[in-house]
Image (cartoon, coloured by chain):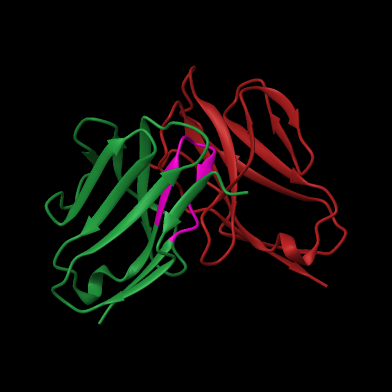
Chain colours: A green, B red
Amino acid sequence: GAVVSQHPSWVICKSGTSVKIECRSLDFQATTMFWYRQFPKQSLMLMATSNEGSKATYEQGVEKDKFLINHASLTLSTLTVTSAHPEDSSFYICSATEAFFGQGTRLTVV
Amino acid sequence: LAKTTQPISMDSYEGQEVNITCSHNNIATNDYITWYQQFPSQGPRFIIQGYKTKVTNEVASLFIPADRKSSTLSLPRVSLSDTAVYYCLVGDGDMRFGAGTRLTVKP
């Protein structure tokens, strides 16, 4: 079974609203989680590294105020896309350690 | 400067062995080499990881020459369900993906 659970699998939201994506590690604790976005036919782009109990480390060019990451416990990290716009529509993926990835979340902003 | 270079795409036929090579000329002493498989609309799946020489598991083999500047993922007897994108990552906890190789297995 899955060791990293990502929820929701897909979400549709209106422009200007915020969306929260959850990434849970099952059966193990993850002090570090990673968040990616992926556009069609492209590779995964690392957005940020989420560290339990501290601030996330964002990759260059990723707006930290738009993509809020919270890693409040050793089994849960969340990514909130604030004031979403159509250009934020993408496939978002989390991972806990280098071995386990979530199923991904398809975000569509209309 | 990209850490890894892979062919953009490869075609194969069912039952054949497929070898995908990844170049990583600037690999550091502490870096491991990890390969992933990704199907459309799914998260990547870990396939295999190695540091040097040869590693084999139930799905693939990983060949790493002595200079470690490249690695080859070997998939024995591929089937249609092996059609996917394959990524190699090089690092010591560095989780940045390269462009990957799109493998298409034909009947």
Q: Position of residue A34 (x, y in %)?
A: 37, 42
> Residue B93 lies in what quarter of the image?
top left
Is residue B103 visible to the viewer in this orientation of the structure?
no
Looking at this view, is B80 or A34 the one in front?
Answer: A34
State how many labels appear.
Answer: 0
In magenta stretch: residue A102:
yes
Would residue B16 be found to the left or right of residue A14 on screen?
A: right
Spot the residue most to the right: B15
Report whether A76 appears left or right of A104: left
The answer to whether residue B61 is above or below residue A101 is: above
Q: Position of residue A78 (x, y in %)?
A: 29, 49
Closer-to-camera residue (B26/B14): B14
What residue occupies the far top of the structure in this picture? Answer: B29
Give, as a single range, the part of the protein colored magenta: A93-104
Residue B16 horizontal/vertical position (percent) = 85, 57
**B85 relative to A17, above or below:** above
Above or below B90: residue B86 = below
Is B70 situated above or below B16? above
- The image shows residue B94 at horizontal and vertical percentages of 41, 33
Task: Give yes or no for residue B61 being in the magenta stretch.
Answer: no
Residue A56 shows in this picture: yes
Q: Is residue A4 left or right of residue A108?
A: right
Q: Nearer the viewer, residue A94 or B107?
A: A94
Viewport quadrant of the C terminus of chain A: bottom left
Q: Residue at x 77, y 67 (%)?
A: B80
Q: Looking at this rendering, what residue extends furthest in the bottom direction?
A: A110
Query: Is B25 placed left or right of B82 in the picture?
Result: left
For image coordinates 37% across by 39% down, the residue present is A33
Front-most of residues B10 and A31: A31
